[in-house]
Amino acid sequence: MNDILLEELKNIPILCVEDEEGIRKVVVDTLKYYFNEVYEASDGQEAYEMYLEYKPKIILSDIHMKNCDGVELVRKIRKDDSLTTIIMLTAYSNEEYLMELINLNINHYILKPLNLKKLNEALLKYLDKANEPILLAEDLQLNLQKRELIYKNEEPILLRKREKEFLELLYNQKGMILSYLDIEEELWASKEMTSHALKSFIKELRAKIPVNIIKNIPQEGYVLKEKN
């Protein structure tokens, strides 16, 4: 994997779930080569609690574990979250069994034993997906990696980090309201978000966007206007 791709992974949080301590240590040490933010859990229950607290973008999990296995972990996560990338480690190559995993909406599976080649393939697939532009409205795309809005054939509009993250959150809600609390927790994590600060932020962001895509729901939050 080249240096540019490695740099893209550095600031992405990942959670490793494995009940065998020796194996988990090896996998975590390997992941730390790619990622700055690596969390680890010894079973599905602990992993779910860490998922709720740290919101990793990628989860790399074994399947058979005591106290909530990997399958149950995926079921819990997928109840409300279809976006987090889930990569499963399995010792099984049975086609019917692997289809069951795919039906649980996992993104990738790796047959054990895990090695660098298999891990690289999974991470490259993640980057390919992450680099796909998001369609916010007709003729309006968001490039998350470059932090740019692209409208028709006009010059790209450069966004600040918080602006890009806000639009990504709106898109991920898929028609549901992005609450003020969610915005504060996700975008103002290090300090309190005042109503004045939020209104100023939204006003400046709207001024950058060539079409009106941000709808305010009074006393609740914001939604992304439906594409025509």
Image (spheres, rainbow, N blue to C red):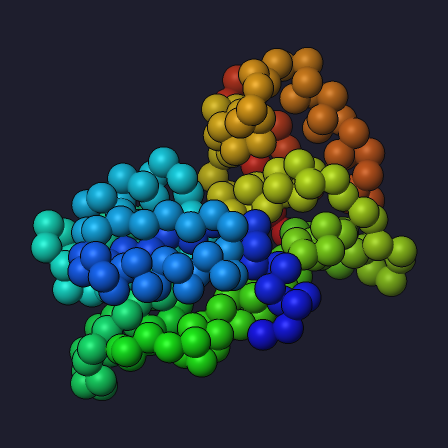
Residue at 62% from the left image edge and 38% from the top image edge = 166
Residue at 48% from the left image edge and 24% from the top image edge = 181
Q: Does residue 101 show up?
A: yes
Check the picture and name the quadrant holding the N terminus: bottom right
Residue 32 placed where, x, y %? 46, 57
Q: Is residue 183 left or right of residue 197?
A: left
Residue at 48% from the left image edge and 74% from the top image edge = 120
Q: Is residue 135 left or right of residue 186?
A: right
Of 60 and 24, which appears nearest the observer?
24
Residue 142 placed where, x, y %? 69, 54
Of 147 and 196, which appears nearest the observer?
147
Of 31 and 133, which appears nearest the observer?
31
Residue 47 placed where, x, y %? 27, 47
Q: Is residue 170 left or right of residue 18?
A: right
Q: Does residue 81 show up?
A: no
Residue 194 placement: quadrant: top right
Residue at 75% from the left image edge and 34% from the top image edge = 205
Residue 3 placed where, x, y %? 66, 68
